[in-house]
Amino acid sequence: MRELPRQLSVDELAELFEGRSRFVERLAELPDPLEAALDLVDDVPEHELVEALEAHPQIGAKSLSERSAREQGPAEGAAVETELAYLNQVYEEKFGFRFVVFVNRRPKSEIADVLRARLERTREEELETAVRELVAIARDRWEQP
């Protein structure tokens, strides 16, 4: 397990966060960016947080980075894949941003349960949760290269 870095470049952070965004650029300006990420959230305009979430791939997407594919695990069958696609669409229509969850090597069927539960929340609760999950993913990616 690697320790959290004192400084990371925009490119390094973009890899951890699945894309370059204004949020990632802001993090690159900070010492201890992965430690400071959640503190920064309060100071970042909502549209920048949404941009960072949108850079992340959908759960169950067919086109994934090698790292995301490994984290999301193998396919679990057409029924689970179809349900995830549907739930992702409902989620994005309701909240206006992509569903992001720290999979942490859980099966997709379990993630579908998480997605259904999170659909019951308010947009504000969900934005906060999604960003926290995004940061947790980035931290895990750094610690488990």
Image (spheres, grey):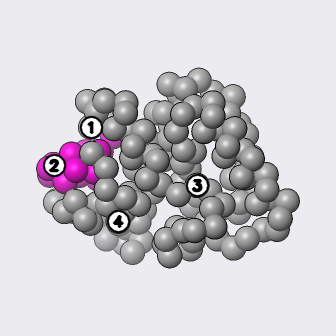
Estimate how packed mark 2 is, as few (under 14), some (14 to 19) or many (20 or more) residues with alpha carbons within 10 Å: some
Earlier in the chain: of badge 2 and badge 3, it is 2
Q: Image point 60% across, 39% down: which residue?
A: 92
Q: Split into 4 quadrants, where in the image is the N terminus?
A: bottom left
Earlier in the chain: of badge 3 and badge 1, it is 1
Question: Circle 1 sits in a helix, a strand or a loop, which is it?
Answer: helix
Estimate how packed mark 3 is, as few (under 14), some (14 to 19) or many (20 or more) residues with alpha carbons within 10 Å: many
Visible residue check, residue 136: no
Circles 2 and 1, Cβ within 8 Å, touching? The answer is: yes
Q: CA distance from mark 4 to mark 2?
A: 17 Å
Residue at the spot of label 2: 30
Amino acid identity at mark 2: Leu
Amino acid identity at mark 3: Gln
Circles 4 and 3, Cβ within 8 Å, touching? The answer is: no
Earlier in the chain: of badge 4 and badge 1, it is 4
Q: Image point 71% across, 52% down: which residue?
A: 85
- Which numbered tag is attached to residue 15? 4
* Relative depth, front residue between 68 and 137: 68
Q: CA distance from mark 2 to mark 1?
A: 10 Å
